[in-house]
Amino acid sequence: MTNHNFYNKILKNQDIYSVLKKLGSPIWLYQADIIKKKIQQLKKFDIIRFAQKACSNIHILKLMKKNNVKVDAVSLGEIHRALYAGYTNKNDDIIFTADLFDKKTLKKIVEMNITVNAGSLDMLEQLGKISPGHKVWLRINPKFGHGHNKKTNTGGENSKHGIWETELAIPIIKKYKLKLIGLHMHIGSGVDYQHLKKVCNTMVNYALSLNQKIQAISAGGGLSIPYKSTDQEIDIEHYFKLWNQTKKVISKNLKTPITLEIEPGRFLVGESGILVATVYAIKRVGKKIFTLVDAGFNDLIRPTLYGSYHHISVIKKNNINDKKKKTMKTIIGGPLCESGDIFTQNEKNELIERELPEIKIGDYLVFHNTGAYGATMSSNYNSKPLIPEVLFENNIPKIIRRRQTIQDILNLELNIKKEI
Ligand code: LLP
């Protein structure tokens, strides 16, 4: 078992017990200090724009805003979240990034004059027709991509994201007098430096060949975080240098100042969050031991969807640690009526045993580094309510989302107006 220092960033057991006692299990816990520290690490970039899909709780967005972080929205819901958190349509505080508009979203964007990062030529046409002069960015598909999993690769021929024939965007922009603000590239989550160099060079090539008076470029998101104790932390200085050089070359050639944006999701929030669940069953199946907790892939889907690794630690129910330090090898699963509801599996969906301190019924398991794409990817599968979120700031816990009730779920299907 790895017990790297890295994992000691979690809250004190006492804090976890007291929240569990009041709000029950399972639960998401976040630490504001970690988010603030991560923001600081990116301070050299001109603009940090949070990809809120990673963790879109209004209170997390408020924290971002307080720390001068702008926000990206990918849906009408995310626009509303940003507005609730206090973001406005001023200074491009909110940018809408997508590959299509639905009717309601387009209406709101035009009404509020929200800048659009267009991922398709159709978006430019549809926006231009009803809102000539609107501010736009072009999300370019650089014709290659990279991701921690093929499902998170957002560039190349197999990706639906971004504009492939970027040169065709210019006549549409001209036709509707759209105002081109910037060029954007996000090739996927989990970027390595080799790919990064390629992205930077490609950004320069596009900027120079399109030869438009842009004001900004965006490096997209994708900055990785260490999930395993053996994973390397990203070298931000290196990352920044490459992009800053790109900005300088573009600025010099286009003879105009350029602002450099970065758009991380995971990097800002991933390490700030944990999922805490309670052990309710420990069963032997053939030679294997399955430890089952009250959180499932309805709460944290990353292991099931991508085979993602999350470090797991054990908190004893009575806070007394076993002095003999006995361990056990076990598979960890949830309560759902589906065999894929396993937190310890690899990309091929093979079940992997974890060596953990001996677990007893009533102990708690902590799933680490689940602040990004944890709560936001949760569902009501098996009619399980969404679980609460708590944010610790200066050691004080604040409920930032209450537990959904079963009645909340049922209400969507009850008292429906009969006419269509
Ligand atoms: N910008 C754009 C345009 C994006 O599509 C994304 C992520 C980001 C920024 C932020 O990427 P990040 O910095 O968080 O890697 N559910 C997956 C990740 C999907 C990301 C989709 N787009 C996961 O759990 O790993």
Image: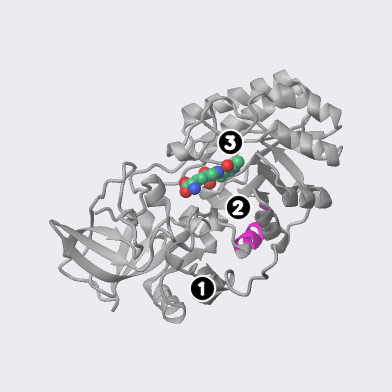
**Label 1 CA crowd tier, 10 Å (few <14, some 14–19, many 20+):** some
Tag 1–tag 2 contact (CB < 8 Å): no
Task: Give the overall secondary structure of the magenta segment.
Answer: helix
The colour style of the image is one colour
The residue to which callout 3 is attached is 186
Question: Which residue is painted at 13% across and 56% down in the image?
Answer: 287
Q: Is mark 2 within 8 Å of ligand 1?
A: no
Q: Is mark 1 within 8 Å of ligand 1?
A: no
Counting the numbered discs, the total is 3
Label 3: element kind: loop
Identified by mark 2, the residue type is Gln
Q: Is residue 126 above or below residue 35?
A: above
Label 1: element kind: loop
**Label 3 CA crowd tier, 10 Å (few <14, some 14–19, many 20+):** many
In this picture, which residue range is highlighted in magenta? Answer: 60-69
Question: Which residue is painted at 22% across and 58% down in the image?
Answer: 330
Instruction: List x then y, in percent, for residue 410.
Output: 54, 72
Instruction: List x then y, in percent, for residue 344.
Output: 30, 53
Label 2: element kind: helix
Q: Nearer the viewer, residue 395 or 201?
A: 201
Task: Estimate the spatial distance between the alpha carbons at disc 1 and disc 2, rounded to whole Å.
Answer: 21 Å
Identified by mark 1, the residue type is Arg
Q: Is mark 3 within 8 Å of ligand 1?
A: yes
Rendered image: mark on residue 52:
2
Identified by mark 3, the residue type is His
Rendered-image quarter of ligand 1? top right
The residue to which callout 1 is attached is 403
Query: Which numbered disc, 3 or 1, marks the residue closer to the eye?
Result: 1
Task: Estimate the spatial distance between the alpha carbons at disc 3 and disc 1, rounded to whole Å.
Answer: 34 Å
Q: Earlier in the sequence, mark 3 or mark 1?
A: 3
Q: Is residue 316 above or below residue 177?
A: below
Q: Earlier in the sequence, mark 1 or mark 2?
A: 2
